Image (tube, rainbow, N blue to C red):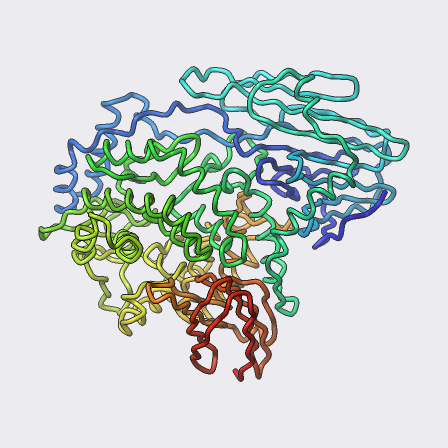
């Protein structure tokens, strides 16, 4: 059997658990590869395979009681405000009597190959450059990948006598599923039919077609999962022809072209391998939709948080490195998803707050309605979601320079965000501007409630959107109103201890023992001019990082590893090399399994958020850039938070806002930088030894070497 596989790592542990599987995927379909020589298992999934379990409801009509909610918040009755929303919702519809979740991402099937020649010496590994998973043992070998070119799962086993079985994945669905397997000679077709979901738009089911080809030496599987019901013969006939090598030759350049955009050398540091592993997972789970919490993989019918898209941090962390590592195309599926949800976002704004514009809930899935909230997790009070998504539109503009994208997609979305803020924010009074408010999943010390007013993140997100519109869309008729609102935003608050406060409201004290750090939001991206230009605020942000990191490095913390990656990214942006490296060391050591797939908690819960968060943290330690403003100057710093643990190294293919492509290598004595731009670009370049101004000409590399 010809070998096209050079595993990026090797592991000798077999497993019966999908949670510890190796992964391969093309974004549309994913395969969890696990088992042993006695039985090789491939649990397949599809990015659109959400089981209809919970009927979408209109968001609760809380706009009518908004004055009362605001009175309760001002009076400090935070719990009562949250309960008022829940009581009103339950009165409107009995479905709100209990917490409502979005529909779960479920597995399509499990394909089991039973070799006739099992043996000892099992090893497994994944070739990140091609997406091929290899499992081998004495006398046997099995390779698998999911083709980007042909949208099929391809498996080759060097045992033509192996048996092939196809069935639903193990476990109990939350609603019954009617499944049948049809045999067409050696080929198999599984048809899954959803039951009990009678509401409009609920999907009917899915089809998995499997072609089985045997030669004198090997067994070849070609399989495709597709939403919708098809006749078995029709589904089988749609599978492509070709052998393993043919299909791999078509796929490998596409996958490899994405993975190969960046090369990192940290002298063998563990972060180097995890950087590659994380990028591999995000590339492999981005298709027509962005990665869910579990990417494009599922081995359970009840995945944590339903494995949808959680946008109070998770999805943003998963996508945080796609621009800086040269793969902006991986961001576009998010914008395509948002396009399908805009009507729901508008309805959320109207029913919850009587406002125009859009409001995006924290949890997205088959719909974008604000259905998930409760008396503790009072998520109807979180209004920053659409604005945060707006930053991702800005990032795409900054990292691609596509004016067509700016005018046709980014600016219309940002205007819709601003429309909401213009109606929602209570300007012209002494009351809090953002009321109600919410700092993702944290509660101020002493209140026992997550409901609040004037969360710092709300101010930061609104300012970010308004500044961008006033820069990029200054001639718009609403520009004067945008400026008035921007000037009305409350200033940052610094606590008596000199820490940047998580809540601007002076009644609310910080709670640093928490997995989120939402008040550090600007430092995951281009920063905040107000902080960059104010030494007091900069010092306060530094103290905020250190306070939160102290808790993270204690034994009290064990959950949400991507939160620590975001904290480390903020540290790097602020120039804190030791703190950034401490965060990186903890996430590298505690949140990755031998499969090189990350977890949400320490060795618990298969989850890909950190697969984007860790590469973003590494890049932030090596490269920092600001938004390019009206002057067109790219402001770039190389090695802003380089730790002593990396005395030598290199990174090729990083991208700064502009866009400007950056190659950098360093030793204890020197740093060499090569910059490239597709347009004429002035650059202010920050180096360890000082600042320089230079001019880039289209397509011409500009290289320089300086002392460190």
Q: Is residue 558 visible?
A: no
Residue 403 position, x and y percent, is 41, 52
Nearest to the observer: residue 406 or residue 499: 406
Left or right relative to 129: residue 45: left
Residue 15 position, x and y percent, is 69, 41
Q: Residue at x 67, y 17 (%)?
A: 232
Vertical relation: 661 (above or below) 33: below
Nearest to the observer: residue 2 or residue 438: 2
Where, by quadrant of the figure, is residue 77 drawn?
top left
Instruction: Report the number of discs.
Output: 0
Residue 596 position, x and y percent, is 62, 51
Q: Which residue is drawn at 65% across and 33% down?
A: 43
Q: Residue at x 73, y 25 (%)?
A: 165
Where, by quadrant of the figure, is residue 167 drawn?
top right
The quadrant of the image that shows the N terminus is top right
Nearest to the observer: residue 163 or residue 28: 28
Left or right relative to 705: residue 256: right
Left or right relative to 117: residue 588: left
Where, by quadrant of the figure, is residue 343 drawn?
top left
Q: Which residue is drawn at 25% across and 46% down?
A: 418
Q: Is residue 225 visible?
A: yes
Vertical relation: 402 (above or below) 179: below
Nearest to the observer: residue 628 or residue 688: 628
Point out the residue furthest to the right here.
Answer: 216
Point out the residue furthest to the left here.
Answer: 429
Left or right relative to 91: residue 155: right
Residue 531 position, x and y percent, is 29, 67
């Amino acid at each position: 059997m010809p070998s096209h596989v050079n595993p990026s790592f090797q592991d000798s542990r077999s497993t019966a658990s999908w949670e510890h599987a190796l992964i391969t995927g093309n974004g549309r379909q994913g395969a969890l590869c696990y088992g042993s020589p006695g039985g090789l298992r491939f649990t397949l999934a599809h990015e659109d395979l959400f089981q209809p379990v919970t009927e979408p409801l209109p968001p609760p009509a809380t706009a009518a009681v908004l004055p009362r909610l605001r009175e309760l918040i001002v009076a400090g009755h935070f719990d009562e405000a949250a309960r008022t929303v829940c009581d009103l919702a339950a009165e409107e519809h009995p479905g709100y009597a209990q917490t409502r979740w979005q529909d779960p991402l479920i597995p399509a099937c499990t394909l089991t190959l039973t070799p006739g020649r099992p043996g000892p010496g099992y090893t497994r590994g994944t070739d990140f450059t091609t997406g091929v998973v290899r499992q081998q043992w004495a006398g046997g070998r099995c390779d698998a990948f999911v083709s980007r070119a042909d949208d099929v799962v391809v498996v080759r086993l060097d045992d033509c006598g192996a048996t092939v079985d196809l069935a639903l994945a193990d476990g109990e669905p939350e609603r019954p599923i009617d499944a049948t397997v049809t045999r067409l000679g050696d080929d198999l077709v599984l048809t899954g039919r959803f039951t009990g979901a009678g509401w409009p738009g609920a999907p009917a089911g899915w089809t998995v077609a499997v072609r089985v080809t045997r030669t004198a030496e090997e067994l070849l599987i070609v399989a495709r999962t597709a939403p919708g019901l098809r006749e078995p013969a029709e589904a089988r006939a749609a599978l492509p022809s070709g052998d393993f090598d043919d299909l791999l030759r078509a796929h490998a350049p596409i996958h490899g072209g994405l993975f190969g955009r960046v090369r990192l050398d940290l002298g063998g540091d563990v972060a180097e391998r995890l950087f590659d592993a994380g990028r591999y997972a995000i590339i492999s789970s981005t298709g027509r939709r962005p990665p869910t919490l579990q990417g494009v993989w599922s081995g359970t019918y009840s995945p944590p948080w339903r494995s949808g898209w959680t946008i109070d941090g998770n999805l943003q962390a998963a996508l945080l490195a796609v621009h800086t590592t040269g793969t902006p195309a991986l961001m576009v599926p998010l914008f395509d998803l948002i396009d399908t949800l805009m009507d729901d976002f508008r309805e959320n704004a109207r029913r919850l707050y009587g406002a125009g514009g859009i409001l995006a809930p924290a949890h997205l899935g088959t719909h974008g309605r604000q259905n998930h909230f409760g008396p503790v997790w009072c998520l109807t009070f979180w209004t920053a979601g659409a604005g945060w998504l707006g930053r991702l539109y800005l990032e795409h503009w900054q990292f691609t320079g596509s004016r067509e994208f700016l005018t046709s997609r980014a600016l219309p979305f940002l205007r819709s965000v601003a429309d909401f803020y213009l109606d929602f924010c209570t300007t012209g009074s002494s009351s809090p501007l953002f009321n109600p408010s919410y700092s993702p999943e944290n509660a101020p010390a002493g209140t026992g409630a997550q409901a609040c007013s004037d969360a710092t993140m709300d101010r930061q997100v609104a300012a970010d959107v308004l500044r961008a519109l006033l820069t990029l869309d200054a001639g718009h008729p609403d520009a004067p109103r945008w400026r008035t609102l921007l000037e009305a935003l409350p200033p940052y608050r610094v606590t008596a201890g000199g820490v940047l406060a998580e809540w601007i409201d002076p009644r609310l004290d910080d709670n640093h023992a928490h997995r989120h750090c939402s008040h550090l939001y600007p430092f995951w991206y281009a920063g905040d001019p107000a902080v960059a230009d104010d030494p007091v605020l900069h010092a306060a942000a530094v103290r905020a990082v250190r306070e939160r990191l102290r808790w993270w490095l204690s034994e009290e913390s064990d959950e949400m590893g991507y939160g620590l990656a975001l904290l480390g990214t903020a540290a790097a942006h602020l120039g804190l090399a030791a703190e950034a490296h401490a965060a990186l060391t903890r996430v590298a050591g505690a949140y990755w399994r031998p499969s090189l797939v990350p977890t949400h908690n320490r060795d618990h819960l298969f989850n890909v958020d950190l697969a984007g968060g860790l590469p973003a943290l590494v890049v932030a330690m090596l490269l920092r850039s600001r938004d390019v403003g009206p002057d067109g100057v790219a402001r770039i710093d190389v090695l802003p938070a380089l730790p002593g643990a990396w005395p030598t190294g290199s990174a090729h293919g990083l991208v700064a806002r502009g866009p400007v492509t950056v190659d950098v290598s360093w030793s204890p004595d020197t740093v060499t930088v090569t910059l490239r731009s597709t347009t004429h670009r002035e650059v202010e370049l920050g180096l360890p030894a000082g600042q320089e101004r230079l001019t880039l000409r289209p397509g011409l590399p500009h290289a320089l070497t300086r002392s460190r």
